Amino acid sequence: MSIKNWKWLHGLSVQKKLTRAAELIELLLGVIILLHCIVSTAGMVFRVNVIKLFYNTAYLQYQLSSACLIIIGVELIMMITSYSIDSVVDVMLLAVSRQMIVEHTAPLENLLTVISVGLLFLIRKYL
C-alpha cells in the first residue's frame, strides 16, 4: 500500500503531514509510557516487602523513588496530551520534588530546590 492511498494524508500540505506524523509519534510514546507505568506499578505492588519498609530506610527510599517515577510517567502522559502550561509545571514540580525527597542532598541544594519549587508555583499562578 502506497502513501497516496492513505486517506488521512491525502490533500495535506507537507507541514500538516509532518505535524500529523509528530502527533502519531507522541501518541505511540504515550502508550508505551502508560504500559510501562502499569507494569511497573504491578511489579511494585507484588514485590513490596511490607515488613522491610518499617526497618530498612534504604528499601523505603527505593520504593518511594519507584513510586515517584511512576507518578512522573503518568504526569508526562498528561502533559503530552493536554498541551497546557499547567501540565508542564506539574511534571517539573514532581521531578524537582522527587529529587529532594529521594536523594540526600546538601542544605544549599535543598534551599535551591525549595526556591525552584516556589518559582514554579509562581509561574503556575501568574502565567
Image (cartoon, grey):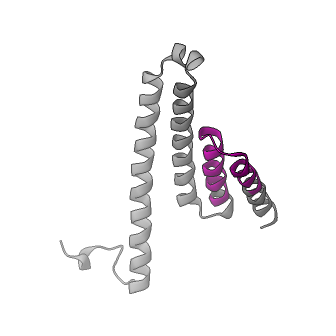
At horizontal 69% and vertical 59% (from top left) the residue drawn is 86
Please, which residue is most extreme toward the bottom here?
13
Horizontal side, residue 95 vs residue 5: left or right = right
Looking at the image, residue 73 lies above or below residue 60: below
Count the marks.
0
Horizontal side, residue 27 vs residue 97: left or right = left
Residue 17 figure quarter: bottom left
Viewer-closest of 4 and 80: 80
Residue 80 is a magenta residue: no
Give the image location of residue 120, x and y in percent. 73, 58
Quadrant where the C terminus sits is bottom right
Horizontal side, residue 83 vs residue 27: left or right = right
At horizontal 62% and vertical 40% (from top left) the residue drawn is 104
Please, which residue is most extreme toward the left here?
1
At horizontal 43% and vertical 30% (from top left) the residue drawn is 42
**Magenta segment boundaries in residue numbering:** 88-115
Viewer-closest of 66 and 22: 66
Viewer-closest of 106 and 99: 106
Give the image location of residue 96, x and y in percent. 64, 51
At horizontal 63% and vertical 60% (from top left) the residue drawn is 88
Quadrant where the N terminus sits is bottom left
Residue 102 is a magenta residue: yes
Most common SS among magenta residues = helix
Residue 85 figure quarter: bottom right
Give the image location of residue 54, x and y in percent. 59, 16
Viewer-closest of 127 and 119: 119
Give the image location of residue 36, x and y in percent. 41, 43
